[in-house]
Image (cartoon, helix red, strand yellow):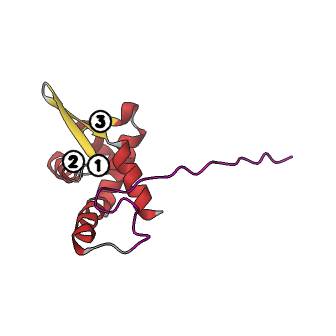
Amino acid sequence: MTKIVIRKRTQLQGPACCPSGIGKPINRKSAEALAELLKAVADPTRLQLISLIRDSDQCSACVGDLTEAVGLSQPTVSHHLRVLVDAGILSKEKDGYWTWYTLKMDRLGELAAVLS
């Protein structure tokens, strides 16, 4: 016998520029703000970094944890991480010599709301 699982769909809220997503017409300023957010994740390396950080303990990693996994140099990975921080998808925190990047789960929820 097959078990049927029913999942309750949670209501996601989009980013401040267009909290209802793009289901309704948005003005130019909102479209530009949303485009900047989407540009930040519209890169294969950045998507890899997001998924690697998402899969890590406490959704947090440092550059050294990520360079080998994506096959890029440390400066290149740092650049991509900075773009994600600037877009508000990651936060960063210095701990001695290390900088830890942490995924902002609420921001991912905002992205999901835009695309749903």
Instruction: Give the residue number, with chain letter if any, for mark 1.
Output: 89
Q: Mark 3 falls on what kind of element?
A: strand
Q: Secondary structure at mark 1?
A: loop
Q: Nearer the viewer, mark 3 or mark 1?
A: 1
Start and end of the magenta stretch?
1-24
Relative depth, front residue between 47 and 107: 107
Q: Are marks 2 and 1 in contact (CB under 8 Å)?
A: yes
The local crowd at label 3, few if under 14, some if 14 to 19, many if 20 or more residues have their Cα within 10 Å, is many
**Disc 2 to disc 3, C-alpha distance:** 13 Å
Residue 105 place in picture, x, y as percent: 37, 43
CA–CA distance in space, label 2 to label 1: 6 Å
Query: Label 3 belongs to which residue?
Result: 61
Amino acid at circle 2: Val
Q: Which residue is mark 2?
A: 85
Q: Residue at x 39, y 42 (%)?
A: 54
Q: Residue at x 34, y 49 (%)?
A: 107
